[in-house]
Image (tube, rainbow, N blue to C red):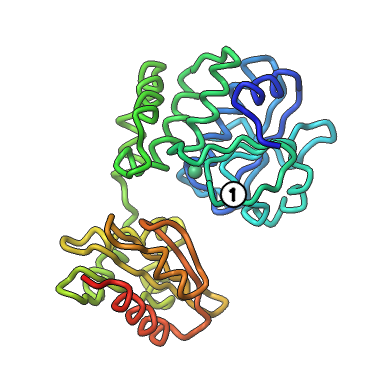
Amino acid sequence: MMMTRAEVAQFLLERDHFCILTHRRPDGDTLGTAATLCRGLRQLGKTAYVLENPEITAKYKPLLDGLTKTAAGEDDTLVCVDVASGTMLPASYSHLAEDIHLRIDHHGTADSFTQRELVEPKTGACGEIVYGVLQLMQVSLDKEMAEALYTAVSTDTGCFRYGNTTANTLRVAADCVEAGADTARLNRELFDTNSYARLRIQGWITENTRFFRNGKLALCALPLKVEKQLGATEDDMENISGFPRSIEGVCMAATLRENPEGGVKISVRAIPGYDAAAICAKFGGGGHKGAAGASLDKPLEEAARMVEQAMLSCSAL
Ligand SMILES: [Mn+2]
């Protein structure tokens, strides 16, 4: 059942015990939104926790200080945030998928899988939706809540640089500043800090990216053994596919990484006028025109040649 923000506010007000669920490989939006909702519900005198996500990385751990628990209670109302499908839940609590009472999300392509849903595909970050609901419930932002909310809206919009940034995103961010969020510190930690391993990976990509069509198309095939040699963890690799696209003149870039279990993960990034999803669709994947992904059960170099062909045939320019 699809619900409006007002109906969701009413639903939350009527209940007292909450457990909030986040998605696997959790990002700033799912975790920041969960922390915001949890703190907002507590401000109203309710019992609320975020279910511990085993895949949380060090960068985001402080957001959830004092907010987590390890198992959902019998009487808990289960709310998931920023979770596009049941398969997006961490394996350790995927069994809860069918019991979720409410899903708050902004993924338009998502399958409906919960009893009640508030989904706004045009909203830049899930945090904006939850903040809108909390405002209807007369919750007022405090500093901790504001820093969690700012983390949600800033990370999903690439620090307000991506096309999903709206006037509302910026208004929400302004509210966070007014409520005391230290946005300069958050921006430095979230967007202006690189691990040494990540910089070494970027160095390798810089040296080894191949260019086609006068440098408009780029492809980087990153062997797993290079990731290991340079000491990169998944945390260091977050959003790495955006890096070759950021090279001057590159309109569309594909990054290929080897899965430890075999096969290759393809991520394509593109600027307007190019279609990353069309490339990935050729390999059974999908996504948006600007960012898409696919998997290919081939050795790295063979996969690279196939992706190169797909990029050349899809781009007339
Ligand atoms: Mn999101």
Q: Is residue 96 above or below residue 257?
A: above
| Total labels drawn | 1
- Lateral position of residue 276 relative to residue 101, left or right: left
Q: Is residue 195 above or below residue 177?
A: below
Q: Residue furthest right?
A: 74
Corner quadrant of residue 12: top right
- Name the one closer to the observer, 110 or 197: 110
Q: Is mark 1 within 8 Å of ligand 1?
A: no
Residue 44, horizontal then vertical, whole percent: 65, 15
Residue 88, horizontal then vertical, whole percent: 62, 54
In which quadrant will I find the N terminus?
Answer: top right
Residue 266, horizontal then vertical, whole percent: 43, 70
- Name the one closer to the observer, 279 or 154: 279
Residue 166, horizontal then vertical, whole percent: 36, 33
**Residue at image x 32%, y 51%?**
194
- Lateral position of residue 210 relative to residue 314, left or right: left
Q: Is residue 59 above or below residue 199?
A: above
Identify the residue position indicated by label 1 in the image.
84
Q: Residue furthest front?
A: 316
Name the residue type under label 1. Answer: Ala
- Lateral position of residue 52 relative to residue 33, left or right: right
**Residue at image x 33%, y 44%?**
163
- Lateral position of residue 150 relative to residue 132, left or right: left
**Residue at image x 59%, y 21%?**
40
Badge 1: how crowded within 10 Å, few (<14), some, or many (20+)?
many
